[in-house]
Amino acid sequence: MRFFTRDTVWVTSRGVCFEARQALGDYLRQVIPGGPAGGSVEYVGESVHEISPGTAVAVIDQTYLDKLGQPRDFDARHTHMYVLTQTGGDWRTAAGQNTVRA
């Protein structure tokens, strides 16, 4: 969670909005795949655009994988959009949106 600003805003693929790093962290600990299911997640950076000094937008392709490393049958692919801010040389996510890909 150190990669998120303290006051980050995040919207899930189902439209739930979390405001603040702690609330987002509580949610993510519940939904990230793995553990007994043996699943994993693959992230691929699609693009990064610097929109002003110290502010960038990143587009990330996310795929949920089953225990065999294959995309899940349902809602496997998502696209994330992150707004990143730079403070003291470090980049952190200030806002993000996750959208299920059709």
Image (spheres, rainbow, N blue to C red):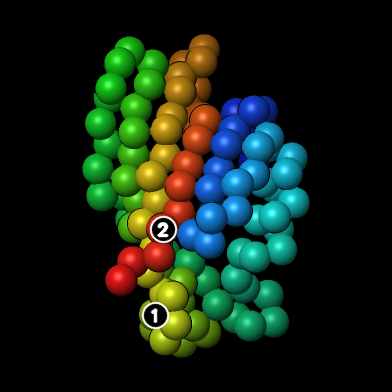
Q: Nearer the viewer, mark 1 or mark 2?
A: 2
Picture coordinates of residue 18, whole percent (x, y): 64, 44
Left or right, 37 with reference to 42 = right
Q: Residue at x 26, y 49 (%)?
A: 46
Q: Report the number of numbered marks.
A: 2
Picture coordinates of residue 63, whole percent (x, y): 40, 68
Q: Which residue is mark 1?
A: 71
Examine the rendered structure and indicate whether residue 3 appears above or below residue 14.
above
Q: Residues within 10 Å of mark 2 (few under 14, many from 20)?
A: some
Q: Quadrant of residue 43?
A: bottom left
Q: Residue 99 has which mark? A: 2
For this rendering, which residue is in front, 95 or 85?
95
Q: Earlier in the sequence, mark 1 or mark 2?
A: 1
Amino acid on which disc 2 is placed: Thr
Examine the rendered structure and indicate whether residue 102 appears above or below residue 83.
below
For this rendering, which residue is in front, 34 or 29?
29
Q: Residue at x 63, y 83 (%)?
A: 37
Left or right, 25 with reference to 78 = right
Picture coordinates of residue 78, whole percent (x, y): 39, 63
Q: Quadrant of residue 56?
A: top left
Quadrant of the image for the C terminus?
Answer: bottom left
